Image (cartoon, coloured by chain):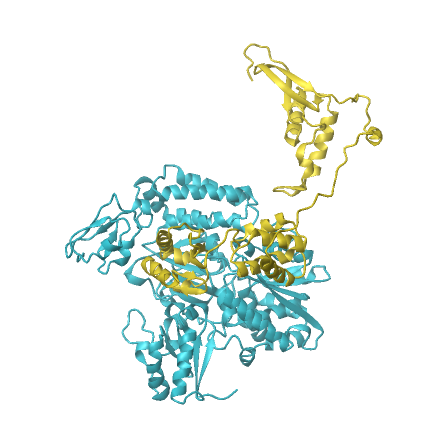
Amino acid sequence: MNQGNGQKVGAVLVVGGGVGGMQASLDLAEAGYKVYLVERGPSIGGVMAQLDKTFPTNDCAMCTLAPRMVDCGGHLNIEKLTYSEIESIEGTAGNFSVRIRKKARSVDPDKCTGCGECVEHCLVKNIVYLDQPGRAPVQIEESVRTKADRIIGRYDGDRETVVPILQDITDEFNWLPPDVLMRVSQEKQIPLEHILRIATFYKAFSLKPRGKHIVTVCMGTACHVKGAPRIMDRLERELGIKTGETTSDMRFTLESVRCIGCCGLSPVITIGDDLYGKVNPVEAAAILDKYQD
Amino acid sequence: MEPYRTHVMLCAGTGCVSNGSFRIKETLERELKKHNLQNEVAVVMTGCNGFCAQGPVMVVKPDDIFYQLLTDDDITHLVEEHFLKGRPVQKLMYTPPAEELPVPKMSDIGFFNKQRLIALRNRGMIDPEQIDEYIARDGYTALAKALNEMTPEQVIEEIKLSGLRGRGGAGFPTGRKWELARAAKGETKHIVCNADEGDPGAFMDRSIIESDPHSVLEGMIIGARAIGASYGHVYIRNEYPLARERLIKAIKQATDYGLLGKDIFGTGFDLDVSIHRGAGAFVCGEETSLIASLEGRAPEPRIRPPFPVESGIWDAPTNINNVETWANVPDIINRGAKWFSAIGTETSKGTKVFSVVGKVKNTGLVEVPMGITLREIVYDIGGGIPGDKEFKAVQTGGPSGGCIPQSLLDLPIDYEKLAEVGSIMGSGGLIVMDEDTCMVDVARYFLEFLKDESCGKCTACREGIDVMHGILVRICEGNGKEGDIEMLEELSEAVKDSSLCALGRTAPNPVISTIRYFRDEYEAHINDKSCPAGVCKALITYVINEEKCKGCRLCAKNCPQEAITGEVKMPHTIEQDKCIKCGVCFDVCKFDAVSVT
């Protein structure tokens, strides 16, 4: 803070009344400064109240937040400017003038006790609609739907069935088609967001169509020290794609896996269900020819 | 069962199957029939016998003759000579590296005779798909003993006395865990067999299930009874289809025999075992993450306590043990804690299965007593380093472990000793590295693995590993700068201190241990811009040795960049500005004329 001209003003403006802003205000107020705490919303508190637990201590969010709100609310050195926004700031460090627009609240805060009677009696109400308009029924091809339904029908239960269902879908379609996932969501009454969360977490699932033959290069430690990266380079060049991609004719998909437990045969590649051990880059490229049909 | 003169134990583990052991079985049976020997010689498909590098392998009982590297064409000759005329075929036997004469007997081969089999006691001896064969080798007698002659408390006491510790990595005493699970309050309890063997370079769990699934099941039933659990789960990796198939068969057979399900052995004790297939996430090997995955939540670890023994699957007490741990249990009950605790060291009892892989002659799976030295494993069992190369390091414990240098080769292996030198036991992967392995590249490799596998919950793990990986990539590309090593060390501490689960807390180990023992390699990359092992692409050049080159043009034909020039029968040269260092010339050269500098 520039104190050169001796014009220091003993007041501080804190912008934002979330948990950080409140703690800053409290520390400053305790240190003897007059604090103006500006908050855009009608109340201080911020988003922390919406959290359950906080990392890494797993403390309950409300237990952290509430004491600070109460302290801020009652502190004589803190002037709260809620439902307000900053319009301009002028001046230099140590001597700012700030224009704040205080939005009309039409309630005298000094008299209000927070009883909520006015909300009850207001004729114009902000009603919150809890039921959503609902998703349109899933458009899905007849044959695909039969297959999807057969898979879904195999599993009874809630969210613990998602992984096995997705595995069966992968076995059937080689990837996870979006319309099938929507069907799963609809039939099992599990939010699509959760299904996608699971589908993107695990390596075994792909949200992109995959080729007829899936070429996997093992990248386990034993294979790595025996030259698996060079096999991968060679196959990438041979197929003209990068790891994780599919050739444009949908014949090959190139993937890497972290150890398939055949370390005695390293380096190892698999194509579909066939396993090839002790290969070098040249041999690996030659093996692809067997699958050109 | 019909009596046979001879049994042929043909390996049907994943390694040998991919090398055609089922095809060999058909040929063998056909040839035997041709000579009308099908009633004298029985062909048994066994589980993995460990010597994967020499597959497909077979052992002829009762003479114990070991045949290796079999092909279809060998079989006709083999059947005529061995089974018809009684003359073992020398050319199909194993010849130890430095010797000339083959060793006919399996028990005389160095790879096998230093081993002591407990968890793998039935490997290569039984058909894993036949419960009767397991029972014939004293299978399920331990269960009968535990159910009829012992109280649950006695079973737990026996396991405690034996000193068995978790074989999945951390080494928590198994008996203590069971005791906690038994004492925990809850109407239903669960036991889990953790077969999500994620450590790259370790495959003992797969092999145990493939060669002897009933030993795992029996261990689980004994454990469930001791704890009072009525639900069992096996969480198995997606990448192990054969193991899963055998386990499904085993569960069905055991249920048919009344060894699983309701009212086992008429004691009123119930247990159902279900199989859950993983979907390729390394972090699922962590207990709390595994539980989340079973329940269908996103598999992120959570804070412990409460530990799973108090609150696990659906908040019920849950006891989780690794495959190898479960497989040890029946033998301990059968033979007693005293017998088991006589094997091993002061703090680590019994045996441990290691997968000896990488730059070693006899790659495969071995079970050895705790306290054996690394030198014995690498040289006596593993047969040393191929191609007269020099040994550099052994990497143990997977991505959470570290690299152990040559100076510590005489270290006796147990949980504590490995931790002292900056590594861990882990699940038992031992990856041998020679002079051609770049330690900076190894550290980069592990961090790349962990960067992909971090679940992303803790910032320190997610971002810290990413930044460390970035620094290592830069060093490998020749753009390392002064202070990088110190920065890596500082970040390692930060990631270690502020991550929640073991994945993050041990993630820096590969970096710390390689810096500790191989700092000179890091410095060579950073200061001299050179990779002493000749691995890091940006720091190497391929050159053709004029004296060795015969001018066959093979390399020139294969070079994708057309960077190799030279006349036929004249020494070739590589135009370095065109070379992309793909190494094709090195691979195709038949005269070893291409070298890396």
Give B336 or A292, whichever is nearer the viewer.
Answer: A292
Q: Which chain is cyan?
A: B
Horizontal relation, residue B537 to residue A118: left or right = left
In percent of width and height, residue A85 lies at 66, 22
In percent of width and height, residue B155 lies at 64, 70
Give A211 or B421, whichever is nearer the viewer.
Answer: A211
* Residue sitting farthest toward the front: A142
Horizontal relation, residue B382 to residue B250: left or right = left
> Looking at the image, can residue A221 be seen?
yes
Give the residue displayed 49% in from the left and 49% down from the top: B452
Rendered position, A20 above or below A165: above
Rendered position, A268 above or below B28: above
Rendered position, B429 above or below B72: above
Horizontal relation, residue A6 to residue B434: left or right = right
Give B264 or A175, whichever is nearer the viewer.
Answer: A175
Quadrant in the rendering for residue A70:
top right
> Looking at the image, can residue B344 be seen?
no
In percent of width and height, residue B559 lies at 26, 52
In percent of width and height, residue A28 lies at 65, 23
Give B537 or A164, whichever is nearer the viewer.
Answer: A164
Give the residue displayed 64% in from the left and 20% down from the top: A86
Give the residue displayed 51% in from the left and 60% down from the top: B197
**Chain A's colour?**
yellow
